[in-house]
């Protein structure tokens, strides 16, 4: 039965994308039931490269219709894990199933059940949009009649039908990303893997793409397995697994993960940060840390305590602010470092150089 919330117009890229608040609402809709059989089941999965243990026996479940975020710093093991789940890499130990198929023994069945949108561009820019989709359909063995119907449908979904006969080399970055998603969905996968789907895109195009992804999840009940270094995008996930040094250090909803921070985040600048930190420790029992010339600490009911903090700290306070924890704060607390956008930009530049050389 179709509920009022589920009744939406056909998926398309709107001229005006959803706002951030509307995206958050769309992410909360059609929340999957976290119980029963999982569409992805991972148990003790492990992968070594010589003496290096990249993934250290991790276990987790992903449920049908879920937007599942996989976050970790560079070298944490997330790419290795995804490559194993997509059958691109064999596990050293442990087991995993996807849509009921074993990733080691039933690799062809697993590949039929998944769609992939790689971080690096993977379209042939010497072909048109429709030719790229036609080639993908042929690889998956779709009959000609089915292929034609689905190509038409997918191109309309991502608002590229009018450009279907144009060479991909003439497309913008956002158009290429939309075409890659259309290609990943062409064979109707059960699970869509999105590896940094909006990296390098401008904020407006990112909103457009997320408007499409979340509406698509709601209408088609496709499970989305996502990696991203944009913490605002991670907010759209139903649950997030944080992986560090090959181990999952936390797995929960975004809101529950924020509760790990331990209260509101207070940032202040004083004339003597070291003395102020000692006074905060003595009066409030919390440890303040130095970040870029400021003192930062977490405390419950931060807004109510600001007047008391101002009273107890004797060095002159130049500024003080209070905010709710973000996923950035969670990530720093769990791993001791940030997912830096500039790191991703550096990786993108290196990839660009490699592509030009090739």
Image (tube, helix red, strand yellow):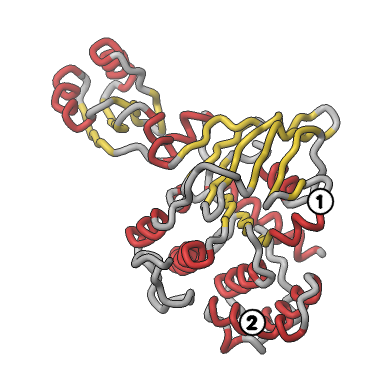
Image location of residue 350, percent across then percent down = 70, 54
* Quarter occupied by the N terminus: bottom left
Q: Earlier in the sequence, mark 2 or mark 1?
A: 1
Question: What residue appears at the point 76 percent right and 63 percent down from the top-left corner?
Answer: 355
Question: To which quarter of the image does residue 284 belong?
Answer: top left
| Left or right, 221 with reference to 39 | left
Name above or below for residue 246 compared with residue 222: above
Question: What residue appears at the point 73 percent right and 60 percent down from the top-left corner?
Answer: 353
Q: Is residue 202 visible?
A: no
Q: Residue furthest right?
A: 50
Question: What residue appears at the point 69 percent right and 83 percent down from the top-left corner?
Answer: 130
Relative depth, front residue between 156 and 50: 156
Q: Residues within 10 Å of mark 1 (few under 14, many from 20)?
A: some
SS at circle 2: helix
Name above or below for residue 50 compared with residue 127: above
Tell me the mark number nearer the camera, choosing from 2 and 1. Answer: 1
Q: Is residue 186 visible?
A: yes
Q: Residues within 10 Å of mark 2 (few under 14, many from 20)?
A: few
The residue beneath circle 1 is 106
SS at circle 1: loop
Image location of residue 322, percent across then percent down = 25, 36
Q: How many marks?
A: 2
Name above or below for residue 222 compared with residue 284: below
Separation of residues labelled 2 and 1 (CA atoms): 39 Å
Q: Residue furthest front?
A: 1
Question: To which quarter of the image does residue 45 belong?
Answer: top right
Relative depth, front residue between 269 and 179: 179
The residue beneath circle 2 is 170
* Quarter occupied by the C terminus: bottom right
Name above or below for residue 151 compared with residue 249: below
């Amino acid at each position: 039965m179709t509920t009022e919330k589920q009744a939406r117009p056909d998926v398309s890229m709107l001229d005006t994308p959803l706002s951030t608040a509307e995206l958050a609402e769309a992410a909360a809709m059609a929340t999957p039931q976290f119980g029963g059989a999982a569409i992805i089941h991972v148990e003790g999965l492990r992968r070594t490269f010589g003496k290096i243990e990249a993934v250290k026996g991790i276990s987790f479940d992903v449920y049908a219709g879920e937007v599942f975020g996989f976050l970790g710093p560079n070298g944490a093991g997330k790419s290795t894990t995804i490559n194993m789940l997509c059958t691109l890499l064999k596990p050293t130990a442990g087991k995993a199933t996807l849509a009921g198929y074993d990733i080691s023994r039933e690799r062809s069945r697993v590949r039929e059940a998944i769609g992939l949108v790689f971080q690096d561009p993977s379209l042939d820019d010497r072909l048109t949009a429709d030719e790229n989709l036609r080639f993908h359909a042929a690889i998956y063995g779709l009959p000609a009649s089915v292929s034609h119907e689905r190509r038409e449908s997918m191109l309309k979904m991502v608002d590229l039908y009018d450009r279907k006969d144009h060479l991909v080399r003439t497309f913008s970055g956002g158009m290429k990303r939309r075409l890659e998603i259309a290609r990943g969905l062409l064979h109707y996968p059960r699970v869509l893997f999105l590896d940094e789907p909006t990296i390098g895109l401008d904020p407006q195009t990112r909103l457009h793409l997320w408007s499409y992804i979340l509406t698509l999840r709601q209408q088609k009940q496709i499970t989305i397995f996502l990696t991203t270094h944009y913490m605002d995008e991670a907010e759209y996930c139903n649950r997030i697994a944080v992986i560090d040094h090959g181990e999952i250090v936390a797995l929960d909803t975004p809101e529950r993960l924020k509760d790990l921070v331990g209260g509101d985040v207070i940032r202040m600048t004083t004339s003597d940060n070291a003395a102020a930190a000692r006074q905060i420790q003595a009066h409030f029992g919390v440890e303040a840390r130095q970040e870029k010339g400021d003192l930062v600490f977490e405390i419950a009911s931060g807004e109510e305590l600001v007047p008391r903090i101002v009273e107890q700290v004797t060095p002159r306070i130049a500024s003080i602010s209070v905010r709710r924890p973000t996923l950035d704060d969670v990530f720093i607390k769990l791993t001791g470092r940030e997912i830096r956008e500039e790191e991703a930009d550096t990786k993108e530049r290196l990839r660009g150089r490699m592509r030009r050389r090739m």
